[in-house]
């Protein structure tokens, strides 16, 4: 189920998911999800965004990539300001890479050591950065596993993408066992079918900026990669008992256009049903 509050500029969307990994009487796990900040500033010292996050009273903050704005001189100041304040709250903060972070990490001949300097600052603050790594997160006697997946850059190409199957995820993380609840931070939602088939109980994505322009009954119109009517552009989706949450993002880059498509902060509540 879902609901929204907020201004035309920043909307809070709330989703609820049930799982038999947790007992029904367990305290629900409340997750704040951030994606695609692209180094945008939300008020002095990020006060507007931080106030909205504080209202969620979350147990965990998960970031699904593209928090900075990649470039030969990357823009990170506002992003670091946000994380500096977030870690002063009680909830752990865990990040995965989007395509902006990935290309900075992998293409050192273009970007130098900017990615290493950026992530060192995050780690020194206490932010956990997962690059094809898994973080165990015990909650109420249940086991949650958070997988930070860096999708290979070839899968972000506009044309000529290689075939994508579950083998890529299995090679990265091994098989997804049934003894835990698996949360996959995977920036690009296009491959939700594969994420679900691998065993991700909940995938958190962004990347498509909500489809930039949204039309009633049709959803997102176009992606930043100029693809029309993306299947998974914003919101909560389900497939064979697995779930995907796609954020419309907290910022934008290159062409700052949004129509009927507010910036989005997401709250996810995971409840037990066993």
Image (spheres, helix red, strand yellow):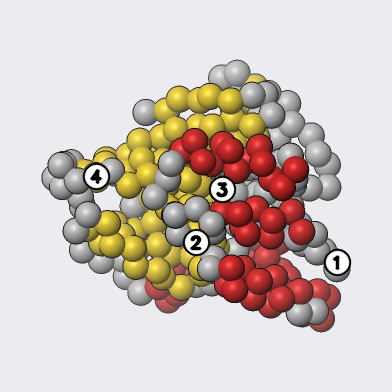
| Cα–Cα gap, marks 2 and 1 | 24 Å
Q: Name the mark on residue 34.
A: 3
| Cα–Cα gap, marks 2 and 4 | 21 Å
In this view, 206 is above or below 216 = below
* The N terminus - image quarter: top left
Tell whether 75 sits left or right of 169.
right
Look at mark 1 in the image and give the residue it sits on: 73
Tell whether 146 sits left or right of 123.
left
Residue placed farthest to the top in the image?
216
| Earlier-in-chain disc, 4 versus 3 | 4
Q: Residues within 10 Å of mark 2 (few under 14, many from 20)?
A: many
Look at mark 2 in the image and give the residue it sits on: 94
Q: Nearer the viewer, residue 206 or 48?
A: 48
Look at mark 4 in the image and give the residue it sits on: 27
Q: Residue at x 59, y 68 (%)?
A: 125
Image spot of residue 133 (x, y percent): 46, 73
Tell whether 164 sits left or right of 21.
right
């Amino acid at each position: 189920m879902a609901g929204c509050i907020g201004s035309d500029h920043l909307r809070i969307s709330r989703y609820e998911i049930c799982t038999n990994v947790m007992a029904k009487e367990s305290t629900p796990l409340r997750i704040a999800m951030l994606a695609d900040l692209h180094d945008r500033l939300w008020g002095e010292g990020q006060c507007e965004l931080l106030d909205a996050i504080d209202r969620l009273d979350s147990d965990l903050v998960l970031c699904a990539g593209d928090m900075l704005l990649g470039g030969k001189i990357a823009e990170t100041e506002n992003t670091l300001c946000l994380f500096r304040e977030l870690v002063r709250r009680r909830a752990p903060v865990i990040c995965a890479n989007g395509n902006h972070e990935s290309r900075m990490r992998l293409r050192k001949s273009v970007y130098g050591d900017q990615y290493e300097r950026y992530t060192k600052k995050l780690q020194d603050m206490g932010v956990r950065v997962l690059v094809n790594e898994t973080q165990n997160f015990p909650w109420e006697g249940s086991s949650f596993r958070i997988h930070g997946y860096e999708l290979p850059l070839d899968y972000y190409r506009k044309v000529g993408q290689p075939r994508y199957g579950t083998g890529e995820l299995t090679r990265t993380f091994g098989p997804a066992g049934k003894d835990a609840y698996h949360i996959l931070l995977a920036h690009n939602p296009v491959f939700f079918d594969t994420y679900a088939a691998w065993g991700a109980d909940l995938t958190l994505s962004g990347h498509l900026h909500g489809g930039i322009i949204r039309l009633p009954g049709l959803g997102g119109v176009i992606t930043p990669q100029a693809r029309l009517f993306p299947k998974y552009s914003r919101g909560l989706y389900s497939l064979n008992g697995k779930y995907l949450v796609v954020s419309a993002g907290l910022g934008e880059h290159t062409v700052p256009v949004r129509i009927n498509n507010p910036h989005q902060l997401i709250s996810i509540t995971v409840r037990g049903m066993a």
